[in-house]
Image: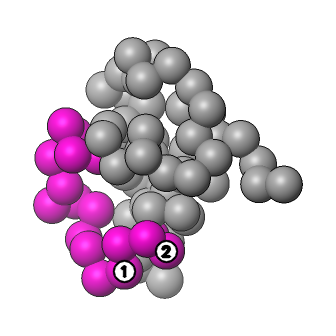
Amino acid sequence: MAQKLEWSHADEIGYQLFEKFPGVDPLTVRFTDLHQWVTELDGFDDDPKGSSEGILEAIQMAWYDEYQD
């Protein structure tokens, strides 16, 4: 069974976004889109209203780390 994703799992979410959107530079993604894409990931099981700018930034940076590799 897949791991349930929560907002606090920035590294795993970043990895999954990298896998789902190859070639997309995370630094070009608006936070409104990022929020939507995270909540639509398979296994996401957290309150959609539970994010903050800081959480989205952490996810964006984790995704960017994957993107750079």
Q: Amino acid at mark 2?
A: Glu
Is disc 2 surrounded by few (<14), some (14 to 19) or many (20+) residues within 10 Å?
Answer: few
Q: Amino acid at mark 1?
A: Pro
Q: Position of residue 36 (x, y in %)?
A: 30, 41
Separation (CA) of disc 2 from disc 1? 6 Å
Residue at point 38%, 28% (across, down): 54
Asked if one can make out residue 37 in the rendered structure from this viewpoint, the answer is yes
Q: Position of residue 67 (x, y in %)?
A: 40, 75
Is residue 16 found left or right of 28 in the rendered image?
right
Tag on residue 22? 1
Asked if one can make out residue 11 in the rendered structure from this viewpoint, the answer is no
- Disc 2 and disc 1 in contact, CB within 8 angstroms: yes
Tag on residue 19? 2
Query: Where is the N terminus found, in terms of image quarters?
Result: bottom right
In the picture, residue 39 is in which quadrant? top left
Is residue 52 found left or right of 28 in the rendered image?
right
**Image: magenta residue range:** 18-34
Q: Secondary structure at mark 1?
A: loop
Is disc 1 surrounded by few (<14), some (14 to 19) or many (20+) residues within 10 Å?
Answer: few
Q: How is the image coloured?
A: one colour
Is residue 29 found left or right of 52 in the rendered image?
left
Magenta span has 28? yes
